[in-house]
Image: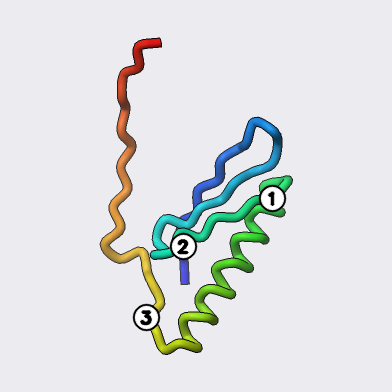
Amino acid sequence: MHYRILLRRELEGGYTVAVPALARARVTFGETVDEAIAMVREAIELYIEHLLEKGEEIPTEEGLLEYTLTVETHA
């Protein structure tokens, strides 16, 4: 399965990772991009394993829309 992930560089260092397609948004953290990706891969695998054990449907990205919105700020 393929899942889109979003990585955000944190001010204090490291990266937060989110998986938009999963109902219970998987969010994890890693000190480096590689570590963050490894952590989210493990989180996704464990989440899917949990869903399978419970006989629940595995979420996909079908129907997921992505859009970039630009807003003005008055700073």
Location of residue 33 with respect to 57 vertically, above or below:
above
Label 3, label 1: how many angstroms apart (C-alpha)? 28 Å
27 sits to left or right of 60:
right
Task: Tell me the number on the disc at residue 30.
Answer: 1
**Dot 1 alpha-carbon crowd within 10 angstroms: few under 14, some 14 to 19, many 20 or more:** some
What coloring was used for the rendering?
rainbow
Viewer-closest of 36 and 54? 54
Pointer 3 or 1: first along the chain? 1
Identify the residue position indicated by label 2 in the image.
3
How far from the left and from the top, in percent, is residue 28?
Answer: 60, 55
How far from the left and from the top, in percent, is residue 60?
Answer: 37, 69
Identify the residue position indicated by label 3 in the image.
57
Viewer-closest of 50 and 60? 50
Q: Quadrant of the C terminus?
A: top left
Please name which of the two marks, 2 or 1, marks the residue nearer to the observer. 1
How far from the left and from the top, in percent, is residue 31?
Answer: 73, 46
At x 28% / y 52%, what residue is drawn? 65
Q: As shown in the figure, which amino acid type bears the numbered disc 1?
A: Gly
Q: As shown in the figure, which amino acid type bears the numbered disc 2?
A: Tyr
At x 50% / y 88%, what residue is drawn? 53
